[in-house]
Image: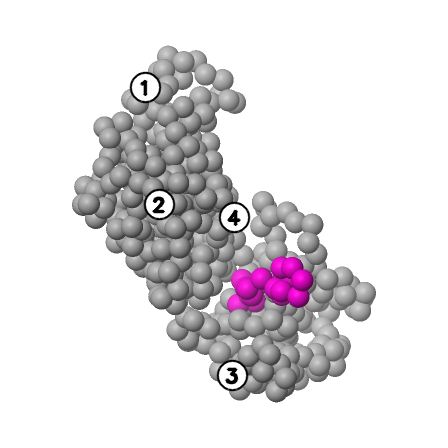
Amino acid sequence: MRYHKIDNQFFTQNRAEFSEKMKEKSVAVFVSNDEHPRNGDQFFPYRQSSDFFYLTGIDQEKSLLLLAPDCPNPKLREVLFVFKTNEIIAIWNGHKYTKEEASELSGIERVEWLDSFEMILNEATSFAENIYLNTYEYPKYSTEVISRENRFTSQIKQQFPLHVLERSAPILYAMRMIKKPTEIELLKEACEITNKAFRRTLTFVKPGVMEFEVQAEIEHEFTINRANGHGYYPIIASGKNACVLHYIENDKECKNGDFLLFDFGAEYANYSADMSRSIPVNGKFTERQKAVYQAVLRTLNKLTEAMVVGVSLDDLDKLSKKLSEKELIDLGLLDAEEVKNQDPKNPLFMKYFMHGVNHHLGLDVHDVGNRHTPLTAGMVLTCEPGIYIQEENLGIRLENDILITENGPVNLMTNIPIEIEEIERLMC
């Protein structure tokens, strides 16, 4: 692993908290992510299941976790399973965890080889009435790919038809929504690596460079600072491309007079930053670009101030609409009278600002979390207003990562340049 070792007390605490929330006479089983085929005999770089990592710290495929907190046999209450390696695997694919290494990383005392899983599971479930299983339940997630979690769930249903199946996700998602101090430090590191990468681009970008060349500069800085890579596929969008919200081709030339929109974030120890910035390709803002940029920045600052304990994401969306409408009127993009008489089901501001302003952040860039839960101390969310003017080939989005505390919002990206004067100075 590239990242520095995480204190295993973090994972131990997470398992203990999950176990406390389980029903009596229960077993919980968690599986690691699949290795995903790319083409031929090649696989995509491995990324662990966020839930599995959260509970174990294990960044290796073919792993299983068994929790049976009130099992009368204390040796079955917490067991980690990893696959047994050998000299051939080591020669072809590199080192895999020993039992001792897996125990040290996870804080789990009992580690077994994978081939003993069935026997131990059968013994643990003989004392249990309920089996907790885990699946990914993010509301906007949809895929035709059958995950290892889904395959495992089908297997358990057939193997233990008389046990009651329970969902792990509601417990885990409530836990993951509130970040512990270890997680906040990991997110801060991801933000700092993102800062270094953005500052690197400010000295590189100029008319004539390609968007993918800018991406390469970012990835160089990520790599030398121990990041896993990107937390999500980066958006490096110049000119009219910046008006495409999920533009990822990153293959066009950055031209003189255009604006360049960045949306990227480093992933460090599986925790992801999420940043958006917008800069002039030639290093100097025009008056029109300044006006639109300052409108977005004012909206960002006012929305951030409103991110306090007790506020809902719906409240922030309503405030965002109000702020955006005013700024768009002041920019001459909307008419005040038309806004006053608009169809509330089809608001006019949506032509220039068509996405939400907040989402939870953590092990996933769109992290688990209930949008209907009011902001609570320990949550980390993005704040990302924008204005997209297709007729002017101008798209501007600004985004910071915000920690919610009892004393108000804390911007985790204060070191990342955002003011016009600083950007122009660093680009000159």
> Which sits earlier in the primary sequence, circle 2 or circle 1?
2
The coloring applied to the image is: one colour
Looking at the rendered structure, the kind of residue marked 1 is Gly
Looking at the rendered structure, the kind of residue marked 3 is Glu
Label 3 vs label 4: CA separation? 36 Å
Q: Secondary structure at mark 1?
A: loop
Q: Which residue is mark 2?
A: 209
Q: Secondary structure at mark 2?
A: loop
State the image coordinates of residue 166 (x, y, percent, origin top left): 68, 61
The residue lying at 28 percent from left, 31 percent from top is 289
152 relative position to 279: left or right? right
Q: Residues within 10 Å of mark 2 (few under 14, many from 20)?
A: some
Q: Which residue is mark 3?
A: 101
> Which sits earlier in the primary sequence, circle 2 or circle 4?
2
State the image coordinates of residue 235 (x, y, percent, origin top left): 44, 45
Q: Which residue is mark 1?
A: 332
Residue 301 picture quarter: top left
Query: Which quadrant: the C terminus?
Result: top left
Q: Which residue is mark 4?
A: 370
